[in-house]
Image: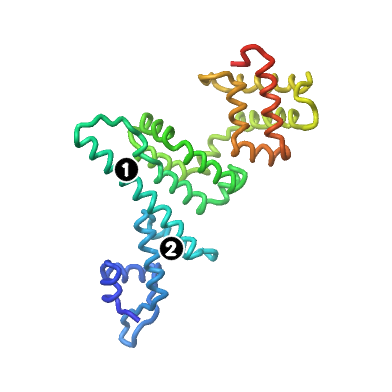
Amino acid sequence: MRTVSQVAELAGISPRTLQYYDEIELLKPSKLTESGYRLYDDEALQKLQQILFFKELGFKLKEIKEILQKPDFDRIKAFKRQKELLLLKRNRTDRLIQLLSSLEKGEQCMSFKEFDLSDYITALEDFKNNSTHDVIKYFGSVENFDMSIQKIKDNEANIAKLAIQQFGSIEKFTEAMKLNLEHFSEFMETQLTEEVKEIGKQSDLLYGRLAADLSKDVSSPKVQAIVHEILQFTQKHSDGADLDKPLINVLIDIYSGDYIKNITDGKYGKGASDYIVKAFRYYSENNAGGNN
């Protein structure tokens, strides 16, 4: 058993911090002496270590308390995840230091790779863990959300560049995204107007017709007529989006991605996404210029 002062010295925190953790029931002492002095055993020290790691990663005390109180909380898994996040944080800091060293020498370094999206990705992971209901409701499953996070990681440099162009810095971009995540449910509900919901229903019907019989040859006039109908419908409701390539090729890219493929196959049956891509590709190859 260790006293408050011994634990405070060992952990590098103040005795008052330990007292406060006790007051908010984040870390209770293992035992109280007859005189009312707090004592902490090894298990309490392990919990304190966990708390300090979460704090280092920017978690608020309220969030840490909620995480530690979850019935399925796994201490070892948490340590592994904290290690991953701290490594990301260290790597980002190292790259920023290297960039500053180059700039200090007068070198021109127009690079965006140093401004990674670690904080944003961490916010997405936190959102997934703390708002699982919303994740499943709007993304279909936790696995789908994981794939969307992976797509961000895979395209991190380009997204970071766009973030800086639009928000001025990664920090401002991350703050804006965190705010969106905090109010994600309300934001989604306000965006899902009746008109948008109706468009979504019509789109689902069109794709449902296209994937109704996956054994049908994609070159058949009936299938190609549905593809044409989808293109006309999508173009009508694209709000004049300026695309850098024909719409049909954009749709081929979208339905070739793992994230959308998983959602589409879950909705219309296994193989539906590949079939849709084949139907789109046939249309693209047999209609001069495709569809802009």
Q: Is residue 189 positioned above or below 247 on the image?
A: below
Quarter of the picture holding the C terminus = top right
State the residue position of label 1: 95
Mark 1 or 2: the one toward you: 1
Report how far apart the C-alphas of labels 1 and 2 lie in the structure: 33 Å
Callout 2: few (<14), some (14-19), or many (20+) C-alpha neighbours within 10 Å? some
Question: Foreground residue, 69 or 111?
Answer: 111
Q: Is residue 12 positioned above or below 155 on the image?
A: below
Question: Foreground residue, 1 or 237?
Answer: 1
Image quadrant assignment for residue 60: bottom left
Image quadrant assignment for residue 246: top right
- Which residue occupies 69% across, 41% down? 266
Spot occupied by residue 187 in the image (x, y as percentages of width and height): 50, 39
Spot occupied by residue 161 in the image (x, y as percentages of width and height): 39, 32
Spot occupied by residue 251 in the image (x, y as percentages of width and height): 61, 26
Task: Check disc 2 and give the amino acid type.
Answer: Lys
Callout 1: few (<14), some (14-19), or many (20+) C-alpha neighbours within 10 Å? some
Left or right of 236? Residue 170 is left
Left or right of 271? Residue 195 is left
State the residue position of label 2: 65
Helix, strand or loop at label 2? It is helix
* Protein image colouring: rainbow
Q: Which mark is residue 18?
A: none
Spot occupied by residue 47 in the image (x, y as percentages of width and height): 41, 69
